[in-house]
Image: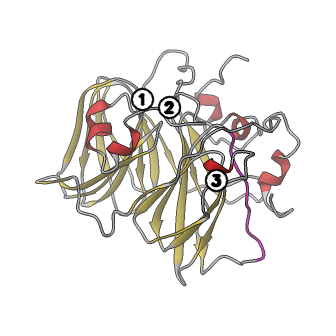
Amino acid sequence: MYVQSDPRSSLQGSAAHKDAVAHTSYFGSQAGLFYREDPQVSDANGDTWISRGQNFVVVYSNGKEGGTFSRETQPDEYALIIPDRETSVEITTAQGSTIVPGYSVAFVPPGASSIRLLTSGTIVRLFTPKSEDLAKAASNADAFNGPHPNVVPFEAWPEPPGGLKLKWYTLDVPEDPSRFGRIYRCTTFMINYLTPRIGPRERDKVSPHHHDDFEQCSLALSGSFTHHLRWPWATNMNIWREDEHLYCESPSICVIPPPAIHTTTAESAGVNQLVDIFAPPRADFSAKPGWVLNEEDYPLPKS
């Protein structure tokens, strides 16, 4: 349910909306409150927090100048968010080294790679659970010891012609009211870097909606948010769940499981920056012409 001015209102009635699914079990939300939890890793490179969902692992690092974050035998493509303009990094892969400025996203190919901070700053890396070392190190790893109900198992999207290579994109793109946020995708992830909201969200313009079979990770980079979740009443009352209203400051993540009806309200008086993350990419967003800013670089799955 979206207000008419929300670009997502055009998704309603499309092929992306399936017939109702009869769910037989539910699973609650997960939250990683990096601003008040101890880091999973603290060393000469900086402090790193790790939290996960069923199909993804979020690795948030406050890195030191010269800090290096390496992967030796990375099994699949991973994503990098550099949220601050003042931060720059050098990414090294089998193809060589590239300097990537701040306020960018990058997609790093499998195999050996390293990210070296040329300045101190924050980086956020996104991995699938195929990166087993990181999945096991997550603060909430125990919650994902087995498969979760309602989430379709992860399946990567097709590789570009010529194979996977380092690609990066600036987040400094003009606003477009016909487009929802700033969306980029690769074979493993879709990142929607939402328009920052100044001040609290209006309470008469929220967007409660649900997803039948995929998770949403909401990454809070600045400000504070309340994530509101409600589970549909099934015919089996034994699976009913209480509503959740999760207040999260920054930095943090909230993992929203299907089929929870959800919406999020910004709460801070200043800048509230949220990033929505999906693994694998969303087909419905990808089907909207012009929504995915790098759609020419990554092919769609064959129907």
* Gap between marks 1 and 3 measured at Cα: 37 Å
Which span is picked out in magenta?
Answer: 204-212
Q: Residues within 10 Å of mark 2 (few under 14, many from 20)?
A: many
Q: Is residue 32 left or right of residue 205?
A: left
Name which quarter of the figure residue 91 lies in. Answer: top left
Residue 24 located left or right of residue 207: left
Quarter of the rendering occupied by the C terminus? top right
Residue 188 image label: 2
Disc 2 to disc 1: CB gap under 8 Å: yes
The residue tagged 1 is 77
**What amino acid is found at the position of numbered circle 1 in the picture?**
Glu
Name the residue that disc number 3 marks.
240
In what quadrant of the picture does the N terminus appear?
bottom right
Horizontally, is 64 left or right of 140 in the view?
left
- Near-viewer residue (36 or 158): 36
Residue under the image location 73 percent in, 42 percent down: 290
Q: Nearer the viewer, mark 2 or mark 3?
A: 3
State the image coordinates of residue 55 (x, y, percent, origin top left). Answer: 48, 36
Chief secondary structure of the magenta span? loop
Q: Give the residue type at disc 3.
A: Trp
